[in-house]
Image (cartoon, grey):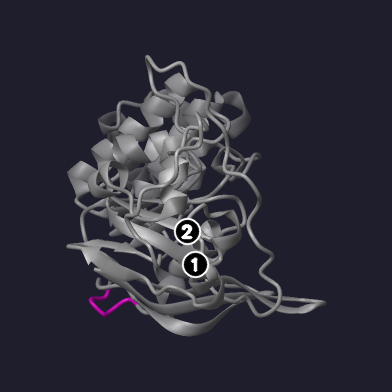
Amino acid sequence: MIELNDIVVSYRTERGSINAVDGVNLEIPDGCIVGIAGESGCGKSTLMRAIYGDILSPMSLSSGTIEYGFNDRNGEPVTSENVRNEWFRTLSYIPQSSMNSMNPVIRIREQFIDFPGTDPNKKRVLEQVREYIGKLGLPVEALDSFPHQLSGGMRQRMMIALATFFQPNLIIADEPTTALDVVVQKEILLLLMELQEQMGNTILIVSHDMGVHYQVTHKMLIMYAAKAAEYGDSDSVFDEPLHPYTKMLIGSLPTIGEDRARHGIPGSPPSLWGDLQGCRFAERCPLATGLCRSQEPPLVEHKPGHFAACHFAGADLPDTGGAGWQ
């Protein structure tokens, strides 16, 4: 189990320090796919980078701790101090624009062979890579190609193969289906699901697409303005969302057979500069009262395993006349 204890991740700027992740507490169980959703700038990718240990200036882990719950290749517990030594071994990262993350001037096979910590016998490693690629149902001859010679979908599949070659305990996939057509998106998601089932590891998937989360995740984290707004089993979050923001996100999804108009959530997230008071969603929330604007709601377990940070968690939203999020 991965535990995040009051995580605060900041960026240093000319104007001062700004918290892109602000006080997130979370328990992620082993062997599941966890989806992370929210608008751009809410802290999703920053949180993933912090978990991965990719913390470089001007970014910093200002406070809080991350407990990984698994050991490194030497049998020692993975911690924030040694996590970078375990990249692509016990935890892997599939970044945004991962199709462009491979070295463009060397062949795909060399990018597997040159991994830190691989067997020094390159011939033996290549045999293992060919066998692994074959098990994934990918064409072995693609290993002899340069990245630009492959389609976007195939490059993405190779990046996933690269990230899972050592069967890591944790895989972080940041927008793994961006810029791919819907058919290829489905194939990529199915590949990730099959790998997770085979390896029994944990996968964190960041995506704006709630439909993706509905299809593949076991748990959902909804983030808003650097805070955790809701967290729970995906079935519970989609069937009975507790936070107004989650209700509006899910309500904006198109449904086959329905012809009513769908609209986005009015307004925009607040600026993270300055001393923010109360609930950060209050200015956009149809349920907001003076209490919401003055007191920040804590993330509370309202149902077994289902948490929400809202003073009126579970309350019905007013009918909006077809706006799509009542």
Q: In which quadrant of the rendered view does residue 17 lie?
A: bottom right
Whether residue 303 appears in magenta in the rendering, the answer is no
- The span shown in magenta is 74-78
Q: Is residue 299 visible?
A: yes
How many dots with numbers? 2
- Image coordinates for residue 171, horizontal then vertical, percent: 36, 54
Quarter holding the C terminus is top left
User: Which residue was labeled with disc 2?
Assistant: 223
Residue that extends furthest to the bottom in the rendered view of this protein = 63
Per the image, label 1 sits on a secondary structure element best described as strand
Q: In the rendered structure, which amino acid carries the disc numbered 2?
A: Met
Per the image, label 2 sits on a secondary structure element best described as strand
Q: Report the residue at 56% width, 32% height from top.
A: 263
- Image coordinates for residue 12, horizontal then vertical, percent: 71, 77
Q: Which mark is residue 72?
A: none
Tell me the distance, in whole angstroms, between the alpha carbons under discs 1 and 2: 6 Å
194 with respect to 248 (left or right): left
Q: In the rendered structure, which amino acid carries the disc numbered 1?
A: Lys
User: Which residue was labeled with disc 1?
Assistant: 227
- Image coordinates for residue 187, horizontal then vertical, percent: 37, 26
Residue count near mark 2 (Cα–Cα under 10 Å), binned few <14, some 14–19, many ≥20 = many
- Answer yes or no: do the residues labelled 1 and 2 have beta carbons within 8 Å? yes
Prevailing secondary structure class for the magenta stretch in the rendered image: loop
Identify whether 95 is placed above or below 150: below
